[in-house]
Amino acid sequence: MELGDFLGALAVIKASRAITFKPPKSAAIAAARGLELRKRFGRGGTPVGVARAVQLKNRRAVSLNTIGRMYSYFSRHAVDRLPGWNDPKRPSNGFIAWLLWGGDPGRVWATAIWKRFSRNA
């Protein structure tokens, strides 16, 4: 890689760190529901998922790097969507975790941004 190419790539990386996105209200509502279910049932999600839910619920700016992590989460966990996973009396751990990451609205939002701005999409 030549110095000019390297500097250009470095500028793109720095710029992408500066770009942030405000979560949509629908993702904030899903994240808040995930936090409520996790508290009620005492399970579902990881500390990282809980931190993401708090960020989304409060509609705090999300970096492109975080969008990439959300995109990866939803890509890996789409297989968790089994019949009955959202049973109101006994939601699955996967359903609660899915909500913590913004639920279906979060998936649609993060996927659209990732595909638009990422070179890896």
Image (cartoon, rainbow, N blue to C red):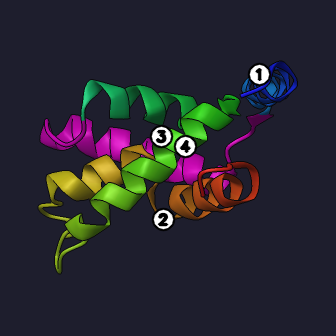
Amino acid type at image mark 1: Leu
Distance of mark 3 from mark 4, alpha carbons?
Answer: 4 Å
Q: Is residue 102 magenta?
A: no
Q: In the image, which residues are magenta?
A: 20-45
Is 67 left or right of 98, judged from the image as shown? right
Q: Let me know if residue 59 appears in the view.
A: no
Mark found first going from the N terminus, 2 or 4: 4
Residue to which mark 1 is pinned: 10
Q: Determine which residue is flagged by label 2.
A: 104
Kindly indicate whether the residue at mark 3 contacts the one at mark 2 (C-beta within 8 angstroms).
no
Q: Earlier in the sequence, mark 2 or mark 1?
A: 1
Category of crowding for the residue at label 2, using alpha-carbon neighbours closer than 10 angstroms: few (below 14), some (14–19), many (at least 20): some
Q: Which amino acid does the dot numbered 4 rest on? A: Gly
Q: Which residue is mark 3?
A: 69
> What residue appears at the point 79 percent right and 25 percent down from the top-left corner?
2
Pointer 1 or 4: first along the chain: 1
Give the number of the mark in front: 2 or 4.
4
Mark pair 2, 1: CA separation: 33 Å
Q: Give 38 or 62, whichever is nearer the viewer.
A: 62
